[in-house]
Image (cartoon, grey):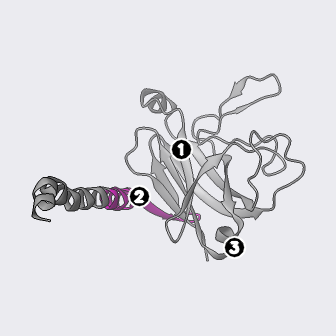
Amino acid sequence: MREWLRRSRGYLIALPIALVIGFGYDGYNVWKEADLKVDVDQGEQAKIGAATVQFQGVQIKQPSSDDSFSISQVPEGAVVVVAKFRGRIDDRARAKKLKFISCESKIEDDEGWNWKSETLSKPYIPESASTTCTGSRTNKKFKEVNPPEGEWYTFYMGYYVPKERAQKAELYPTLDFYKDPRPLRFRPAG
């Protein structure tokens, strides 16, 4: 036994240190991410990057058999959650300077589970609606159309959320704009 302890002492010393660092690092990242998020109530306007955004609400929709226009299929046991936003580019020149091209979006529940956004179209969102934070969309001639500076536009974000999570939890969509260190987490009214 003494011989085994002598040969294994390096591992016995390194194991608790590795566990502390491993769990500590993960905990630090969760704390850091939660600390950076700015909570915004539904209907409240928030500035981020070169834009102003306003959360309008969340709708839970059942998977449709007419989802042939969506890029991916709804996973079994999931529902489609659609978050509606209003946005306005306040300064297009600044937006270009910041390379304000897009944002990432997730939706999380009150227990910390989160799901990334999916590219959706009809029947889940209106056909002519934008699915980008900048309000850009493609017209019938496949040309990109951007809303004028200072004009409000509507955009949608879609997510696939397990049915049991969507039914029993409060869902908080987040927007993380390119080059802005403060992701916005939106709280539904109610």
Of pointers 3 and 2, the one earlier in the residue sequence = 2
The residue labelled by disc 1 is 104
Location of residue 58 (image quadrant):
bottom right
Q: Earlier in the sequence, mark 1 or mark 3?
A: 1
Where is residue 181? Give x, y as percent.
37, 46
* Kind of residue indicated by mark 1: Glu
- Report the span colored magenta: 26-43
Instruction: Estimate the spatial distance between the alpha carbons at disc 3 and disc 2, rounded to whole Å.
Output: 24 Å
Q: Which of marks 3 and 2 is in front?
A: 3
Upstream in sequence: badge 1 or badge 2: 2
Magenta segment includes 31: yes
Q: Looking at numbered disc 2 in the image, what kind of residue is underneath it?
A: Lys
Which quarter of the figure is the C terminus placed in?
Answer: bottom right
Residue bearing the label numbered 3: 167
Residue 189 placement: quadrant: bottom right
Q: Nearer the viewer, residue 66 or 181?
A: 66
Work out whether residue 83 can be spotted: no
Q: Which amino acid does label 3 sit on?
A: Gln
Residue 20 locus on image (x, y percent): 24, 61
- Tally of numbered tags: 3
